[in-house]
Image (cartoon, rainbow, N blue to C red):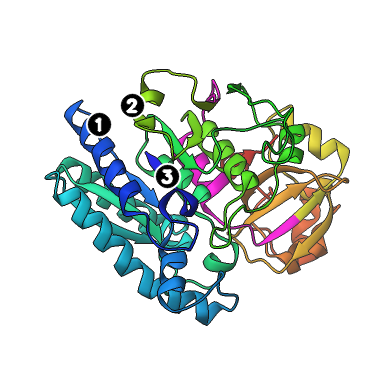
Amino acid sequence: MVKIGTSSLTLPDGSLDVGRIEHLADQALELTRAGRQLVLVTSGALGVGARRLGYSRRPQTIPEKQAAAAVGQGLLMQAYERAFLARQLVVGQVLLTREDVADRRRHLNSRNTLRKLLELGAIPVVNENDTVAVDEIRLGDNDTLSALVATLVDADLLIILSDVDGLYSGDPRRDPSARRFDVVPVVTPELEAIAGGAGTAFGTGGMMTKLQAAKIATAAGIPMFLTSGSQSHVLSAVLAGEAVGTLFLPKPRPLRARQRWLAFHLRPRGRILVDAGAAKALVENGKSLLPAGVVGVEGDFAEGDLVQVVDGSGRELARGLVNYSAQDLRRIQGSRTKDIAAILGRKDYDEVIHRDNLVISV
């Protein structure tokens, strides 16, 4: 799995760097000849479309972004098709939104489509469907998308090609003493504090989005490698074990498929605040969440929605599918299980969130 960012695909004026795409096609040919399968997650459609439409910087409004993406997706795929076909490689465009990976049925359909393309010897070229997305454009990024797609296809490795050759202790463009981390065993809050914002006029991703992608991929047991897209034959160098970037190590006990879907593919609809006793029961003892441990409810969620479970400091402890709506949960919070029926006039479940529908985040 390879994700290539806008800065690695475009020239400073926002136009497509055809030479870079040609070189990417060369590397894809090297991988296929070595018997490897490749899924490519690409950015750049919005930026290329914006330039074609006459924008000097990234469009700001949702309609402008959608229009730019509609123009840019065609230009981008035309460039990929031309470069890859010249090397007798077949590419297939796959446009996704968060709903395509969040809804369980569409999640499985997306997975099957990607796997069939690989089975047929084609290279899926994946991008977010920005022409119809709203929240996805405002909040989404292709670093996260690449990690989600990596979990969809059970990738062996996720490589993110960026404008920097790894994670540094500071911004190497401003701090000459900043050093690169060759290996990151786990993404810590200290590393997240280092991350900054997006680095180019047309790009959306910064280091924070790459760390988020690393957390998703490594939690699924998939190592992630961050390196520069401008290096010659960088994909072969990464696969050869050369020190050309930062390797994020996978967790020794990866999440199962259903846990990954709960943890990363669904969007939380609210938050449940719990006391110290409930936090310990969840995190250390593997228990379900009961109403007695709930001290607060935020948001307007329905039964079956995904919610975050947080402690008194606001730190996320877990995510899970809730058995009661926000309205009902506010009525029974702090109560004993045996009192639920008397308060609500019914008792559908003993648990607010059953352990089987809960994923620990810490």
Q: Residues within 10 Å of mark 3 (few under 14, many from 20)?
A: many
What amino acid does circle 3 point to?
A: Lys
Q: Nearer the viewer, residue 166 or 183?
A: 166
* Quadrant assignment for the C terminus: top right
Q: Nearer the viewer, residue 162 or 3?
A: 162
Cβ atoms at labels 2 and 1 below 8 Å apart: yes
Q: Residue at x 70, y 42 (%)?
A: 195
What amino acid does circle 2 point to?
A: Ser
Find numbered disc 3 in the image and state the secondary structure of the residue it sits on: strand
Q: Which residues are magenta?
A: 247-271
Mark nearer the N terminus (1 vs 3): 3
Residue 128 picture quarter: bottom left
> Distance between the Cα atoms at labels 1 and 3?
15 Å
Q: Which residue is mark 1?
A: 31
Image check: 319 left or right of 296? left
Q: Which residue is mark 3?
A: 3
Classify 206 as above or below 106: above
Q: Which residue is mark 2?
A: 236
Q: Residue furthest bottom?
A: 63
Find numbered disc 1 in the image and state the secondary structure of the residue it sits on: helix
Mark nearer the N terminus (2 vs 1): 1
Q: Residue 319 — which label?
A: none
> Distance between the Cα atoms at labels 2 and 1?
8 Å
